[in-house]
Structure formats: C-alpha cells, structure tokens
Image: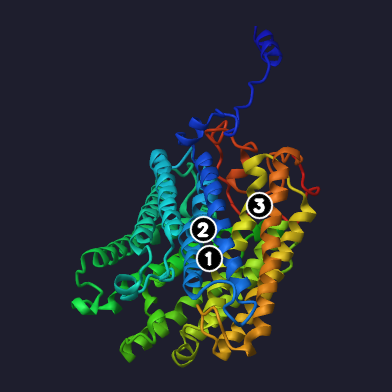
Amino acid sequence: MTTAVATLDRARPAPAAAASYLEDGSSLRSWLLGTDHKRIAILYAIAILFFFLIGGAAATLIRIELATPNGDLVSDDTYNKLFTAHGVIMVWLFLIPSIPSVVGNFMLPLMIGAKDLAFPRLNLLSWYLYVSGGAIILWALALGGVDTGWTFYTPYATMFSNSYVVLTLFGVFVTGFSSILTGLNFIVTVHTLRVPGMGWFKLPLFVWSHYATSIILVLATPVLAITLLLAAAERLFQIGVFDPAHGGDPLLFQHLFWFYSHPAVYIMVLPAMGVVSEIIPCFARKRLFGYRFMAYAVLAIAGIGFLVWGHHMFVAGQSPLANLVFSLLSFIVAVPSAIKVFNWTATLYKGSIRFDAPMLYALGFVGLFTTGGLTGLFLASLPLDVHLTDTYFVVAHFHYIMVGGAVMAFFGAIHFWWPKATGRLYPDLLARSAAVIIFFGFHLTFFPQFILGYQGMPRRYHSYPPEYTVLNVLSSAGASILAIGYLLPLGYLAWSLWRGARAGRNPWNATGLEWQTASPPPTHNFDSPPQAPNDVYGYTPEWPPARSAS
C-alpha cells in the first residue's frame, strides 16, 4: 500500500506556482484600489517619475538661462518661479519619497519575510495623499507659480510675495501626511511581521535604514506640517506668528522649518545608505564589514540629525553660543556617516569585485556622498559659512548629497532589484554606460559651482558678472550630459519589460530573503514560509556564471 501511494504521489503533477503580483488582475480598478505593497510601489514609481521629469524640465530652463551672464531667456520673476518649482517638486515630490516609497515599499516586506506591510489600506491611502498633494502643487504652478524658494521663508512668503504661496503650502502639507503614514507603517511592520528567527541583528541594513528613516518621518514631519499651516494662516488672516509687523518672529519660522528639514536630509540619505549596504557586499562577494557598527551608525545619524538644524542659521541672528553649539554638533553628525564610508571601503578591500551596473551606481554614491559630506564640514565651520552662505557653494554641496548621493542610490536600487520586481534582465552594457555618464556628468555640472560659490557668486540670481561665464557654461554643459544619463535608463528598462531575458529567482546569487521567492514575486510574496538566513551577508568570494538564471 505504501509503495502504491508513493507511486501515485510521483505521478501527481506538481502544484502550479502562484501567479505573480503583475498577473493578479490587470484592470485599472485592481491597481488603483488594490492593497498589495508591490503594486503600490509601482504606482509610486510612476507618479515619482512624472514629477521627476517636471522638476528636471525646470532645472533645464535654469541651466539654459545661466549659460549666458545676462538674463535674456526669462524675466527675473519667471526665474524665481522656475527655481522654486524645481526645488519644491524635487525635494517634496521626488527626493524624500523616492527610495522609501518605491524601493522600501516593494522590498521591505520581502526582506523580512512578511506577506505585506502591517497596514495595507493605510499604505494605499498614503499614495493617494501623495498624489493629491502633488496635484495641488502642480495646480499652483499652473495658475502662476510661487516665487519664495522651496524654503518659503517668512516674512516674504507671508507678506510680500504675490504668488500662489498658500496653495503650494497646502500641497506640501498634504504630502507630509503621506510620509507620516509610510513611516508609521514601516515601524509597525518591522516590529511585528519579521519572519521567526530574524532578530534585530539579523536584519539587512536596508531595513535598519528604513526603520531609522521612519522614526524621523513620524517625529519630524508633524513639525513641518504645523509650521506650514501657521504660515498659511498668517498669510490669510494676518495673525502675528512670524510677521514682525504683527508681533511675530520670522526667525521662529526658520527654527521650526529646519528642525524638520535638516533631518529630512537624512530621510533622503539614510535609505540610500541602506541600498548601498546591500549592493556592495553582493558585488564584492564579502560579508559586510562592521555590521553592528553600521546599524548603530544609522540610529546615531537619525538621532543626532535632530540636533543640528541651527547650522542653517549662522548668519540669521542667533547668539554666538548657539552658533558654537550647532557648529560642534554638525561636526559630530559627520562621524557616523564617516563610519559607514569606512566600512564600505573595508568591505571592498580584497573583495572579488564585479562592476555590474548596480555596483557602479553604489560606488558613484560613495564618491559623490563623500565629496558632499566633506564640503558640508566647510559649511559647519562658522567663519567659512559666513563667506559661503547663500552662494553657489551651498547649491553644489546640497546637490552632491541629495542628487548625487540619493539619486545614484535610487538608480542603483532600481538596477539591483529590477530582475526581482519584473522578472526581466536589462542590457548590461547600456546600464553600465548610463552609470558612468551620470557620474561624470554630475561632476561637470556641480563641481564648477563650488568654485563659483567660493568666488562669491550668489545663488538664485539669473544674471551675473561676465567673469563667471566659463564656469557656468561648464555647469550647463554638464547638465546636458547628466540629462542623457538620466533618460537612458528609461529607454532600456522599458525595453527590458518586453524584450529582456528572463531573470530567474536570484540572478546576483544574493543572500537576502527577497531572493528566496520567484521573480516577479507572487501576490503574497512567498509560496511557502521563508527561512531566516543565519547570516544575511554570508557571501563567499566565488562568483556564479555571469547573470545566472538559476
């Protein structure tokens, strides 16, 4: 009897693999009302790409204007609205949500062995809030724009500007609630939905970085929300919060704004650090050096980041003692960031390194972030900051950290997990070429701006003395190269969706839980309960055949 049963079992066909999340309903309703975290991540990606293109178009017009010293393309008022549109869209609608809302939404549950986020409907609501806030901001731009800069400094924003400030503030206000809900969802998910056996120090650093980022989102974003609400109320009802004419204090706005907005820098950078911490060990085939130090450094960056907002206000009238304290804290916050760069470098040392596209993006992040971090020390120094404040040095530093760092990591994440998300491989040579083009195009765009700022060229001016022409032409030429590098992946990644080779379950021979499931994953992520790895970075130096489909 036992033999007969065994024979019947062998003859019975194997159960069919579960349908992927891409095949589980193709109607528009199933996408717009579904709560699968992977589909919501795709919805975020589409919206974020749309806003990225609009923000990039504004940047293109800015660089065309600055190619000549005379303001001969647009008027001064239009130029003010252009750099404000660029800043508002890129900061609030691209940089802050890009990695957490797209990559984090898709990968975090997979990395901890969960079927979804803790609150799937809240996750869908966060996307609708994000799109609603973005639509309000675009409505304000279509009606005539806003000219305050992305920081909305008072009293100009509340008294003097004749643009659509209140509508823009409301759009950012709504978008902030999307960030709060995402952060709350991530925190609860990490605490409650980890697969059995996955303790805190078995978590991938990608998860650690999103956990720390979520703490910042939940604690800091409400401060920004109430600040923007007060600014809008003051503009509408002439109450005296920030307006000195009504007994308010404009410096209070800066304190409240930067209490959120400096931690917001780490909302953009910490997830990027998590991405790089996954890519470098995989393509160096080595265990991540100093895992616990890296995890503690993530938490330290998030904690100390709340204490350094005043270095944005060294010339705003703070007391000398406050300036001294904020300067010291700004140097201290660089220490955990330096620990991470050191540990990535130590991981690379004597590694069996392959320079696939994700690795090139990760190395580009390390180079650009290090440059941005070192130049940040110049701005943390009181005497240097007095000279460099509101010059193009600040513009260059900000873009090296935010655009050079965060965007390089975002592209690295897309290329690393693209086979997992789509089940397809992209053209490797084109992907490597795009990474190199972006790296060198970025340096050509923004490095001349360090020199311009040191020489004293102020930011937000659309005309300038002729002696700055050569450096501005170099910067504009670099922007055109950078645009090619950014647009190239859109072409070959879209092509790969239909023509790319099948990826297989684990094309990189990586060790994380997300690589234990099919590519693309089924709706509920895993066909059977996953097993927590003993060592999430347990790499061996031997490489499998290139881009194995196993």
Instruction: Looking at the image, tell me whether mark 2 or mark 3 is earlier in sequence order.
Output: 2
Q: Residue at x 48, y 60 (%)?
A: 96
Q: Tell me: 349 left or right of 227.
A: right
Q: Residue at x 52, y 33 (%)?
A: 524
Q: Which residue is mark 1?
A: 294
Q: Nearer the viewer, residue 294 or 98?
A: 98
Q: Tell me: 333 left or right of 417.
A: left
Instruction: Tell me the distance, in whole angstroms, between the alpha carbons under discs 2 and 3.
Output: 20 Å
Quarter containing the N terminus = top right
* SS state under label 3: helix
* Residue 414, x across and y down, in percent: 63, 52
Local packing at callout 3 (Cα closer than 10 Å; few below 14, some 14-19, many 20+) is many
* SS state under label 2: helix
* Residue 320, x across and y down, in percent: 33, 91
> Marks 1 and 2: CB-CB under 8 Å?
no
> Marks 3 and 1: CB-CB under 8 Å?
no
Q: Which residue is mark 3?
A: 416
Q: Amino acid at mark 2?
A: Phe
* SS state under label 1: helix
Quarter containing the C terminus = top right
Q: Which residue is mark 2?
A: 94
